[in-house]
């Protein structure tokens, strides 16, 4: 069993290093020699170390023959993210590995920021030692635990943290699933002076972001109402023009669902826009899944570099575009209506990741875009009024 865990760790480290080598394609030509040496070293490591270890484990019967089902993994990820209870997955050191949408709302910390940081950093100092100790005990297999903690953002509200051990997939180490359940103030208890004094204070940052989303929605409505009647491609081009670059660094529009075609790609100056435009939508798993399932997808620091396919050079689009967060939304006017197309947005570099509020705004606008496309299409066919 120990050898199997060692092999799993070696494979995971190798995959991470290969991803780094892929992202190094954009380095200057003078430095490519160093990258090539690193790639050769990794290949030698596979031949000399990983392959013999794999053969020994296979001969001993320690390796299963099943392959994880991709659709099942997507379903489990979606269930984790959409779970109404605030849930986080941490390691034995309380470092966050995953956090669902409800947990980001409770803690006030975005999932992309929380990942890789101790969950104790979001608690009051008085609760950190106890939480860290209980998490380590659960990870050691000493049973589930539960304790009351307080978040820094709302120190007067007690939060019940329930800890349980979890072994995700074939990972070698035990993780800890943390369920956070906010409590309530006792009935009739007065608000603390600190709570009363800060309640009227507005969140200026959130107010600014809310105003920006309203401006974006207004600009999108204007663009859709003034788009040429009967021209579906023009509707997509108008919508993409509103979103780029004020809202997203990349905007990719694909028309249709069963037979998709890429109509518009807008990206940063000097970016491989033509390569992405030439890509077939059917080669993009995210686009295909959105067109079939009709569900919007929000990803921060996408884990699978191939989830948006590869360009003509064979490089993953997400790696080449240096994507830090993405939104992929189907264009559907009604919940039971057909999908008119798929809209994909990328953010890259130091730009803040897409928030849940921004994703909701795009989801609303996607319905308006789909209605505009369907309305214009109906005018092309006589007798469909």
Image (cartoon, helix red, strand yellow):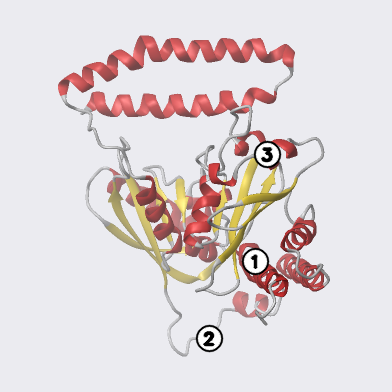
Would you say residue 123 is visible in this rendering?
A: no
Q: Residue at x 57, y 23 (%)?
A: 21
Nearer to us in this view, 78 or 135: 78
Q: Is residue 15 above or below residue 117?
A: above
On-image quarter of the C terminus? bottom right
Relative to residue 30, is residue 328 drawn left or right? left
The mark closer to the camera, 1 or 2, is 1
Residue tagged by mark 3? 278
The disc at residue 366 is 1
Which of 291 and 114 lies nearest the eye of the viewer? 291
> Which residue: 50% across, 74% down?
336
Q: Earlier in the sequence, mark 3 or mark 2?
A: 2
Q: CA distance from mark 1 to mark 3?
A: 23 Å
Q: Are marks 1 and 3 in contact (CB under 8 Å)?
A: no
SS under mark 1 = helix
Q: Residues within 10 Å of mark 3 (few under 14, many from 20)?
A: some
- Residue 333: x and y in percent read 60, 72
Q: What is the C-alpha distance between the residues marked 1 and 2?
A: 45 Å
Q: Nearer the viewer, mark 3 or mark 2?
A: 3
Tell me the tag on residue 190. Answer: 2
Q: Is residue 20 visible?
A: yes
Badges 1 and 2: C-beta atoms under 8 Å apart? no
Give whichever of 75, 31 is nearer the camera: 75
Q: Earlier in the sequence, mark 1 or mark 3?
A: 3
Q: Is residue 378 above or below residue 310?
A: below
CA distance for labels 3 and 2: 63 Å
> Which residue ends up furthest to the left in the rendered image?
60
């Amino acid at each position: 069993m120990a050898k199997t865990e060692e092999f799993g760790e070696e494979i995971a480290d190798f995959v991470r290093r290969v991803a780094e080598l892929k992202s190094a394609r954009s380095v200057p030509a003078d430095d490519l020699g160093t990258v090539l040496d690193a790639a050769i070293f990794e290949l030698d490591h596979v031949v000399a170390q990983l392959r013999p270890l794999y053969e020994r484990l296979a001969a001993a019967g320690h390796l299963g023959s099943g392959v994880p089902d991709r659709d099942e993994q997507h379903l489990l990820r979606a269930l984790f993210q959409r779970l109404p209870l605030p849930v986080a997955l941490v390691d034995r050191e309380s470092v966050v590995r995953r956090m669902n949408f409800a947990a980001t709302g409770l803690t006030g910390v975005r999932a992309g920021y929380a990942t890789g940081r101790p969950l104790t950093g979001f608690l009051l100092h008085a609760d950190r030692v106890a939480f860290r100790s209980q998490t380590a005990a659960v990870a050691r297999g000493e049973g589930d635990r539960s304790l009351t903690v307080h978040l820094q953002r709302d120190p007067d509200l007690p939060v019940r943290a329930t800890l349980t051990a979890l072994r995700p997939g074939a990972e070698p180490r035990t993780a800890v699933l943390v369920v956070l359940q906010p409590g309530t103030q006792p009935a009739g208890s007065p608000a603390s002076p600190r709570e009363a004094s800060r309640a009227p204070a507005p969140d200026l940052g959130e107010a600014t972001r809310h105003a920006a989303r309203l401006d974006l929605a207004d600009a999108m409505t204007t663009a859709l109402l003034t788009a040429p009647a009967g021209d579906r491609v023009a509707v997509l081009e108008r919508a993409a023009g509103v979103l780029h670059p004020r809202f997203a660094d990349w905007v990719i529009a694909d028309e249709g669902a069963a037979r998709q075609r890429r109509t518009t790609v807008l990206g940063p100056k000097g970016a491989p826009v033509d390569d992405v435009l030439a890509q077939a939508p059917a080669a993009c798993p995210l686009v295909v899944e959105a067109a079939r399932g009709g569900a919007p997808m929000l990803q921060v620091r996408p884990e699978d570099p191939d989830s948006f396919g590869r360009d003509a050079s064979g490089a993953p689009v997400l790696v080449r575009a240096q994507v830090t967060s993405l939104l992929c939304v189907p264009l559907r006017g009604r919940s039971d209506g057909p999908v008119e197309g798929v809209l994909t947005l990328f953010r890259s570099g130091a730009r803040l990741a897409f928030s849940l509020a921004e994703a909701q705004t795009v989801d609303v606008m996607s319905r308006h875009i789909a209605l505009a496309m369907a309305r214009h299409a109906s005018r092309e066919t006589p007798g469909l009024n």
